Image: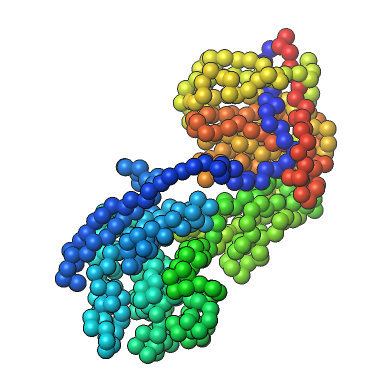
Amino acid sequence: MMKHKLFIPLFLVAAFISQGKSAQAQDTVRRTVEIGKLDSLNSTILKEKRRIEVFVPKNDQPGSNTKYDVLYVLDGGNWNTGLISKIQGFLEGEKYMPPTIIVSILGIDRNKDLTPTHIDGWKTSGGATQFLGFIKDELIPYINQKYPANGDHSIWGHSLGGLFVVNALLVEPKTFKSYIAVDPSLWWDNNYIQKIASLKLAALQDPAVTLFMSGREGKEGETMKIDAMDSLLKKWAPAGLTWKSIRYPEETHSSVRFKSTYDALKFSYGWQDNEINFHPMNGIVLKNKPVAVWYFGDTTRVRYTTDGTNPTLGSAKIQSDIIINDGAKITVKQFTNRARYDQVKTGNFTKGKILTPISKPKNLQPGGFLYDYYEGDFNKAEDLKNKSPQKSGLTNADFEVEKLPRKNNFALIIEGVMETKEEGYYGFVLEADKGSKLYLNDQLLIQWEDHTKRNSPYSYILPLTKGFYKLRLEYLHQNKDAKLKLNYLPPSLCLLKKPFQFLSIYNLEPLNRQAS
């Protein structure tokens, strides 16, 4: 007599899961010293040797193929770079920006390097064109070749450095993705920057970059002449320039760097690294029997469509729930200020029919579940053919995956019959490992692909009637961090608009077939 292996009652939670951040200890004492790599290069343009200090992300591993954004800091050294490094590390930890290489450009003569024109009283002023040429044509290629840079660059400058940053945007707008000007000295040379800004801004051809400018409130802040630049940006900035200008009260020319850097780096990316998360992700829909798709996470600059087209910023804003009355392809997109970090996720909902139940097998009774356990590195269930399991057993209340002999490189095949006592939509959520699959009546519901950043689960919804259904789970465990979880949502909860509020345990009504 054929043996029916029955479904494992692990983690049966009556809710689609909203993925949150894992709690992190807040009281751990950590003492860190940020030390970059001192480096230098001989500049043909400047006709001198220039020193830099490079801070590569802490988690970068030798031999890794990971590439990083680069932030270039003018007036380098501890005065600016030490502050920026700490703020960048905090923002990275809060998922507001990715790991980043910081290049501290150590100065020799800032009055020469950072000013675009020569004025009386500033003997060496007016060398910004050459200094920008050095950064663009010598330093950036050097960093790209020697360090794990991805070609996505930002530049930060304060005071005269801020003047240099704004000038760089106007004359070389495609050199950097983000231009950060902290309390820039836009008074320079009788408002030279403002005089060239209207023509330069009008000539920009969709630069797809960001500009963040900051200043101070009050009379001292007014002397920097940032307001005049704001007016020109409002009138002449092209659509592809995303810009923001802000004034901070009760700050000095020096202290304004802290708040400015925090706000500027957040603005430069315009995102929080939350994975797009909606459930169910795929499914079968009956005509005129609506299904709710619930969206979890930040809604800022998130748009969606239901016809399979790529969303734009003009598409509908995401909602907490999207109602589908027929077949649809949902596409959700989170927009950032850097296209490389935009996220897109799609869900396919096919118009179909209620899945037909099977006839009730003989000798069924409520009870434990049966499983087969295989040891080895398996990429697909077909690899288990003609192999004998190392262990078979009953998945009763005492069964735990963690108690199996191996912690890694094993497979579980769990088959059985479940009884449904309601007619309507049933939701299944599976958290597993790459290559794992969930079937119902031999129909593939969920195929687990590569792990996402936060190992969020896969979900599926389909209409069932009262009766019995064969269920098969192929769990291939390779990733040591992977967990096996199945979450089940009956029709009575699928009809609710916010089912994730309910945490009652629901049973899949498994039935154990006794071998004859």
The count of marks equals 0
Closest to the observer, 172 or 282? 172
Which x, y percent locates residue 193? 38, 85
Whether 95 is drawn above or below 190: the answer is: above
* 254, 125: nearer the viewer: 254
Residue drawn at 66 percent across, 34 percent down: 486
Question: In the rendered image, which quarter contains the N terminus?
Answer: top right
In-image side of 186 versus 305 (left or right): left
Q: Residue at x 28, y 52 (%)?
A: 37
For residue 455, side relative to residue 338 (left or right): right
Residue situated in front as seen by the camera: 101 or 402? 101
| In the image, residue 468 above or below residue 120 | above
Does residue 237 lie above or below 105 as drawn? below
Residue 430 position, x and y percent, is: 63, 37
Instruction: Describe residue 393's horizontal placement relative to residue 506 as left or right.
Output: left
- The x, y position of residue 326, in whole percent, is 73, 54
